Image: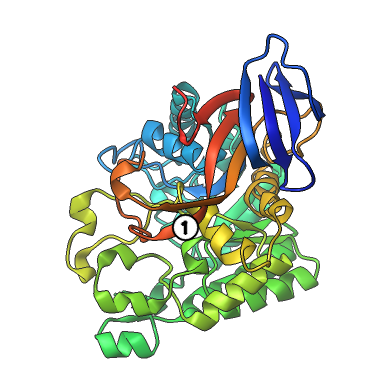
Amino acid sequence: MLLTNVRPYGEGDPVDVRIVDGRVAEIGAGLSAGDDTTYDGQSGVLLPGLVDLHTHLREPGREDAETVETGTLAAALGGFTAVHAMANTNPVADTAGVVEQVWRLGRDAGHCDVAPVGAVTIGLAGEQMAELGTMADSAARVRVFSDDGHCVSDASLMRRALEYVKAFDGVIAQHAQEPRLTVGAQMNEGVNSSLLGLTGWPAVAEEAIIARDCLLAAHVQSRLHVCHVSTAGSVELIRWAKGKGWDVTAEVTPHHLVLTDELAGSYDPVFKVNPPLRTKADVEALREGLADGTIDCVATDHAPHALEDKEAEWGAAAFGMTGLETALAVVAETMVEPGRLTWRQVAERLSEAPARIGRLEDHGRPIAVGEPANLCIVDPGARWTVDPATSASRSRNTPFAGRELPARVVATFLRGRPTVLDGKPAT
């Protein structure tokens, strides 16, 4: 295949990119098409395929909300060529058998690569460590472990997990939430929670776990990844840990880069999420942390839910939002348009860094001859309105419904094979 008229990282004049046997074979201006199939990128920005460290695909167990097939198609439409599937399925992905099932479902669907995340504890119960070694040695080759949705709150167990994954260069991805400080919590603790009469979720519940786990990771010299950072204090703690030279990484979600706790005033459960939407000051600190590299990457925390689980009164509704198809556009709006990130830096935050943290060797690679052709093309000048009815996801709980966003993915290629062309599934 020959991609014509594309601008790698949005820099310089348009060039052509030839793909042969799933790899970039040639880059240059005016390449001859020969017998190649051609695709005109129309001066679009060419990026490495995006990588998500935090996706809920729900299968097995909650196929009414999402399947590997539908979730990975949504991912491809969002420019992703690889996603990490979180472990809170039913049964929980805490054995080699379950992670291999998820991995094979992703391979069979073919829209993007699926890297299963293994549970840290059996059944996500926080009591006994799961079979981390067997999951690491399985065909799924698990390297990221998380009880996401639950915090590994036992400090001794967390220490042992951090020590254990060192043997195979794994990482523990912590859902930082001190459970005793968040009993019954419904939204960010602050002025708005008081006005609305909803139980508050204090920032310190997140920050206390991050501080503890940074110290534990440093003590055992292991890798820690902090999921969905949401407060200004958390950003400062991670900046402090990195300043010490500790092996700590962190992610922020697109929705935490733009939405605030004021939206809870609508009592619309689409804005109910874990961790909760925070204040404008927190949003600004998150943007600054992402811009200066304190926060390593953007991860969607794509959390689809069936209608009956979201269309309920606030207190009974499930936590979570979808995000795969809107992630890049939200980053463009909050970070690229204001000049806080270049497209090359977007590639680092949404592709290279998450692939590096998740140890995905064939993803997040530079756009260069000889590299795997996991790529996406973005129209930076596009304006589009989010319509949940057209989403590839089986769920509709997007907080951006009806919102106009900039920049749209027009094509995605997995090892040179188109999965999305002209903004639509290629198959």
Q: Is residue 88 above or below residue 107?
A: below
Instruction: Report x, y in % for residue 303.
Output: 38, 52
Q: Is residue 200 visible to the viewer in this orientation of the structure?
A: yes
Q: Is residue 311 above or below residue 377?
A: below
**Which element type, helix, strand or loop, lies under badge 1?**
strand
**Residue count near mark 1 (Cα–Cα under 10 Å), binned few <14, some 14–19, many ≥20:** some
- Residue drawn 63% across the image and 20% down it: 38
Please indicate whether residue 122 sits to the left or right of residue 222 in the image. Answer: left
Q: Classify the position of the C terminus by image quarter.
A: top left
Instruction: Name the residue tied to disc 1.
Output: 405
In terms of depth relative to the viewer, which is nearer, 25 or 157? 25
Query: Quarter-wise, where is residue 294 in the image?
Result: bottom right
Instruction: Report x, y in % for residue 422.
Output: 50, 33
In terms of depth relative to the viewer, which is nearer, 52 or 375? 375
What is the count of numbered marks?
1
Q: Amino acid at mark 1?
A: Leu
Query: Quarter-wise, where is residue 416 in the image?
Result: top right
Q: Classify the position of the N terminus by image quarter.
A: top right
- Residue drawn 24% across the image and 48% down it: 306
In terms of depth relative to the viewer, which is nearer, 49 or 41? 41
- Residue drawn 68% across the image and 21% down it: 22
Please indicate whether residue 103 sits to the left or right of residue 225 in the image. Answer: left
Q: Is residue 32 above or below residue 419?
A: above
Query: Quarter-wise, where is residue 361 in the image?
Result: top right
Q: Is residue 185 visible to the viewer in this orientation of the structure?
A: no
Instruction: Report x, y in % for residue 296.
Output: 67, 59
